[in-house]
Image (cartoon, rainbow, N blue to C red):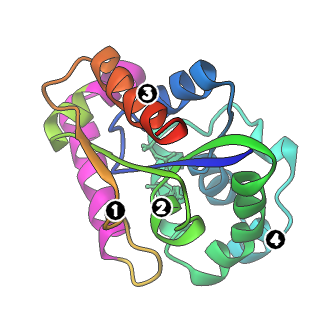
Amino acid sequence: MIFTVAIDGPAAAGKGTISRAVAERFGFRYLDTGLLYRAVGVKGGDPVAAAQTLTAEDLARGDLRSLAAGQAASRVAAIPEVRAALVDFQRRFARAEGGAVLDGRDIGTVICPEAEVKLYVTASPEVRAHRRWLEVGGEEAKVLAEVQERDARDMGRADAPLKAAEDAAVIDTSDMAIEAAIDHACRIITARLAP
Ligand code: CDP
Protein backbone atom coordinates (compact mmCIF):
# COMPACT_ATOMS: atom_id res chain seq x y z
CA MET A 1 0.00 0.00 0.00
CA ILE A 2 1.19 3.49 -0.85
CA PHE A 3 -0.47 6.07 1.38
CA THR A 4 0.90 9.52 2.19
CA VAL A 5 -0.23 11.84 4.97
CA ALA A 6 1.02 15.39 4.28
CA ILE A 7 1.00 17.69 7.31
CA ASP A 8 1.88 21.33 6.68
CA GLY A 9 1.60 24.49 8.72
CA PRO A 10 3.46 27.37 10.37
CA ALA A 11 6.15 27.14 13.04
CA ALA A 12 5.31 25.35 16.29
CA ALA A 13 1.72 24.57 15.28
CA GLY A 14 1.91 21.03 16.69
CA LYS A 15 2.72 19.28 13.39
CA GLY A 16 5.50 17.16 14.89
CA THR A 17 3.44 15.92 17.82
CA ILE A 18 0.46 15.12 15.60
CA SER A 19 2.69 13.46 12.98
CA ARG A 20 4.45 11.21 15.47
CA ALA A 21 1.15 10.16 17.07
CA VAL A 22 -0.47 9.47 13.70
CA ALA A 23 2.54 7.49 12.46
CA GLU A 24 2.48 5.37 15.59
CA ARG A 25 -1.29 4.82 15.49
CA PHE A 26 -1.27 3.61 11.87
CA GLY A 27 2.22 2.05 11.76
CA PHE A 28 3.42 4.55 9.13
CA ARG A 29 7.00 5.85 8.68
CA TYR A 30 7.57 9.47 9.69
CA LEU A 31 9.80 12.17 8.18
CA ASP A 32 10.23 15.57 9.85
CA THR A 33 11.25 17.52 6.75
CA GLY A 34 12.06 20.64 8.81
CA LEU A 35 15.04 18.73 10.15
CA LEU A 36 16.53 18.60 6.63
CA TYR A 37 16.43 22.40 6.33
CA ARG A 38 17.66 22.85 9.91
CA ALA A 39 20.64 20.57 9.19
CA VAL A 40 21.49 22.50 6.01
CA GLY A 41 21.12 25.80 7.88
CA VAL A 42 23.52 24.93 10.70
CA LYS A 43 26.07 23.11 8.55
CA GLY A 44 27.71 26.32 7.37
CA GLY A 45 29.55 26.88 4.10
CA ASP A 46 27.63 26.87 0.82
CA PRO A 47 24.01 25.86 1.60
CA VAL A 48 23.44 24.34 -1.85
CA ALA A 49 26.48 22.07 -1.46
CA ALA A 50 25.33 21.25 2.09
CA ALA A 51 21.89 20.21 0.82
CA GLN A 52 23.41 18.10 -1.95
CA THR A 53 25.68 16.22 0.45
CA LEU A 54 23.51 15.95 3.57
CA THR A 55 24.39 12.91 5.70
CA ALA A 56 22.68 10.95 8.47
CA GLU A 57 25.26 12.46 10.84
CA ASP A 58 24.17 15.99 9.90
CA LEU A 59 20.60 15.02 10.83
CA ALA A 60 21.66 13.61 14.19
CA ARG A 61 23.20 16.87 15.52
CA GLY A 62 21.97 17.86 18.95
CA ASP A 63 21.48 21.56 18.17
CA LEU A 64 18.92 21.31 15.37
CA ARG A 65 15.94 22.26 17.55
CA SER A 66 17.31 25.63 18.70
CA LEU A 67 15.73 28.96 17.70
CA ALA A 68 18.94 29.83 15.85
CA ALA A 69 18.72 26.63 13.81
CA GLY A 70 15.09 27.45 12.96
CA GLN A 71 16.10 30.87 11.68
CA ALA A 72 19.03 29.44 9.71
CA ALA A 73 16.66 26.83 8.24
CA SER A 74 14.13 29.35 7.02
CA ARG A 75 16.89 31.43 5.37
CA VAL A 76 18.36 28.51 3.39
CA ALA A 77 14.83 27.19 2.68
CA ALA A 78 14.20 30.24 0.49
CA ILE A 79 17.00 29.17 -1.91
CA PRO A 80 15.44 27.22 -4.82
CA GLU A 81 18.59 25.07 -5.39
CA VAL A 82 18.53 23.99 -1.74
CA ARG A 83 14.87 22.93 -2.02
CA ALA A 84 15.53 21.17 -5.34
CA ALA A 85 18.35 19.12 -3.80
CA LEU A 86 15.98 17.77 -1.13
CA VAL A 87 12.96 16.96 -3.31
CA ASP A 88 13.84 13.44 -4.49
CA PHE A 89 14.61 12.12 -1.04
CA GLN A 90 11.29 13.43 0.30
CA ARG A 91 9.27 12.11 -2.67
CA ARG A 92 10.83 8.67 -2.41
CA PHE A 93 10.09 8.59 1.32
CA ALA A 94 6.48 9.66 0.70
CA ARG A 95 5.73 7.13 -2.04
CA ALA A 96 7.66 4.05 -0.86
CA GLU A 97 5.65 0.96 0.01
CA GLY A 98 3.89 1.28 3.39
CA GLY A 99 2.26 4.42 4.74
CA ALA A 100 4.25 7.60 5.34
CA VAL A 101 3.67 10.80 7.28
CA LEU A 102 5.69 13.87 6.29
CA ASP A 103 5.45 17.22 8.02
CA GLY A 104 6.74 20.52 6.69
CA ARG A 105 5.62 23.56 4.71
CA ASP A 106 5.16 22.32 1.13
CA ILE A 107 4.39 18.61 1.43
CA GLY A 108 0.77 18.83 0.18
CA THR A 109 1.50 21.55 -2.36
CA VAL A 110 4.87 20.65 -3.93
CA ILE A 111 6.46 17.46 -2.59
CA CYS A 112 3.41 15.22 -2.74
CA PRO A 113 0.35 16.88 -4.28
CA GLU A 114 -1.07 13.36 -4.77
CA ALA A 115 -1.02 12.66 -0.99
CA GLU A 116 -4.06 10.68 0.11
CA VAL A 117 -4.54 12.92 3.17
CA LYS A 118 -3.50 16.57 3.47
CA LEU A 119 -3.73 18.42 6.75
CA TYR A 120 -2.91 22.06 7.43
CA VAL A 121 -2.26 22.46 11.15
CA THR A 122 -2.24 25.99 12.48
CA ALA A 123 -2.85 28.11 15.61
CA SER A 124 -2.56 31.79 16.53
CA PRO A 125 1.03 33.12 16.67
CA GLU A 126 0.69 33.73 20.43
CA VAL A 127 -0.42 30.18 21.16
CA ARG A 128 2.32 28.73 18.97
CA ALA A 129 4.99 30.94 20.53
CA HIS A 130 3.82 29.95 24.01
CA ARG A 131 4.11 26.26 23.17
CA ARG A 132 7.57 26.72 21.67
CA TRP A 133 8.63 28.81 24.71
CA LEU A 134 7.63 25.92 27.01
CA GLU A 135 10.10 23.76 25.04
CA VAL A 136 13.02 26.15 24.62
CA GLY A 137 12.64 28.62 27.54
CA GLY A 138 14.20 32.09 27.46
CA GLU A 139 12.12 35.20 26.86
CA GLU A 140 8.62 34.50 25.57
CA ALA A 141 8.49 37.79 23.62
CA LYS A 142 11.66 36.82 21.81
CA VAL A 143 10.22 33.42 20.90
CA LEU A 144 7.08 35.14 19.53
CA ALA A 145 9.20 37.49 17.42
CA GLU A 146 11.18 34.53 16.09
CA VAL A 147 8.04 32.60 15.18
CA GLN A 148 6.51 35.63 13.43
CA GLU A 149 9.70 36.43 11.52
CA ARG A 150 10.03 32.85 10.33
CA ASP A 151 6.34 32.63 9.30
CA ALA A 152 6.63 35.84 7.29
CA ARG A 153 9.71 34.52 5.49
CA ASP A 154 8.17 31.07 4.89
CA MET A 155 4.88 32.53 3.56
CA GLY A 156 6.54 35.27 1.52
CA ARG A 157 9.19 33.33 -0.39
CA ALA A 158 8.75 32.79 -4.12
CA ASP A 159 9.62 29.08 -4.18
CA ALA A 160 7.19 26.69 -2.42
CA PRO A 161 5.76 29.28 0.02
CA LEU A 162 3.89 28.05 3.08
CA LYS A 163 0.19 27.82 2.30
CA ALA A 164 -2.60 25.31 2.69
CA ALA A 165 -3.22 23.07 -0.31
CA GLU A 166 -6.68 23.72 -1.75
CA ASP A 167 -7.81 20.25 -0.73
CA ALA A 168 -6.21 20.26 2.74
CA ALA A 169 -8.29 19.86 5.90
CA VAL A 170 -7.44 22.78 8.19
CA ILE A 171 -7.00 21.99 11.89
CA ASP A 172 -6.75 25.11 14.06
CA THR A 173 -5.31 24.01 17.40
CA SER A 174 -5.49 27.45 19.11
CA ASP A 175 -8.27 26.29 21.46
CA MET A 176 -7.79 22.57 21.08
CA ALA A 177 -5.90 20.16 23.33
CA ILE A 178 -3.26 18.29 21.38
CA GLU A 179 -5.07 14.97 22.03
CA ALA A 180 -8.20 16.36 20.35
CA ALA A 181 -6.13 17.46 17.35
CA ILE A 182 -4.58 13.98 17.11
CA ASP A 183 -8.03 12.34 17.28
CA HIS A 184 -9.32 14.68 14.59
CA ALA A 185 -6.38 13.85 12.31
CA CYS A 186 -6.82 10.11 12.94
CA ARG A 187 -10.52 10.26 12.06
CA ILE A 188 -9.73 11.91 8.73
CA ILE A 189 -7.09 9.27 7.93
CA THR A 190 -9.33 6.37 8.97
CA ALA A 191 -12.11 7.65 6.73
CA ARG A 192 -9.71 7.86 3.77
CA LEU A 193 -8.20 4.40 4.43
CA ALA A 194 -11.59 2.67 4.51
CA PRO A 195 -14.15 4.82 2.77
O1 CDP B 1 9.28 22.85 14.13
P1 CDP B 1 8.93 24.11 13.39
O2 CDP B 1 7.55 24.09 12.83
O3 CDP B 1 9.23 25.36 14.18
O4 CDP B 1 9.96 24.22 12.16
P2 CDP B 1 10.47 23.08 11.17
O5 CDP B 1 9.31 22.30 10.64
O6 CDP B 1 11.58 22.33 11.80
O7 CDP B 1 11.05 23.95 9.94
C1 CDP B 1 12.15 24.85 10.08
C2 CDP B 1 12.17 25.73 8.85
O8 CDP B 1 12.51 24.93 7.71
C3 CDP B 1 10.87 26.41 8.48
O9 CDP B 1 10.69 27.66 9.11
C4 CDP B 1 10.95 26.52 6.96
O10 CDP B 1 11.63 27.69 6.57
C5 CDP B 1 11.81 25.36 6.55
N1 CDP B 1 11.02 24.25 5.97
C6 CDP B 1 10.63 24.36 4.66
O11 CDP B 1 10.86 25.37 4.01
N2 CDP B 1 9.96 23.33 4.06
C7 CDP B 1 9.66 22.23 4.74
N3 CDP B 1 9.03 21.22 4.12
C8 CDP B 1 10.02 22.11 6.09
C9 CDP B 1 10.69 23.16 6.70
Answer yes or no: do the residues labelled 2 and 1 have beta carbons within 8 Å? yes
- Distance in Å between CA atoms under marks 3 and 4: 35 Å
Q: In terms of sequence position, does the residue under pointer 2 or pointer 1 come before the other?
A: 2
What secondary structure prevails in the magenta region? helix
Give me the disc on residue 108: 2
Circle 4 — which element? Answer: helix
4 vs 2, front mark: 2
Residue 9, horizontal then vertical, whole percent: 36, 50
Answer yes or no: do the residues labelled 4 and 2 have beta carbons within 8 Å? no
Give me the disc on residue 52: 4
Q: Residue at x 46, y 40 (%)?
A: 195
- Distance in Å between CA atoms under marks 1 and 4: 31 Å
Q: Residue at x 59, y 67 (%)?
A: 111
Front residue of 7/134: it is: 7
Amino acid type of the residue that numbered disc 1 sits on in the rendered structure: Asp
The magenta region covers 131-156
Circle 2 — which element? Answer: helix
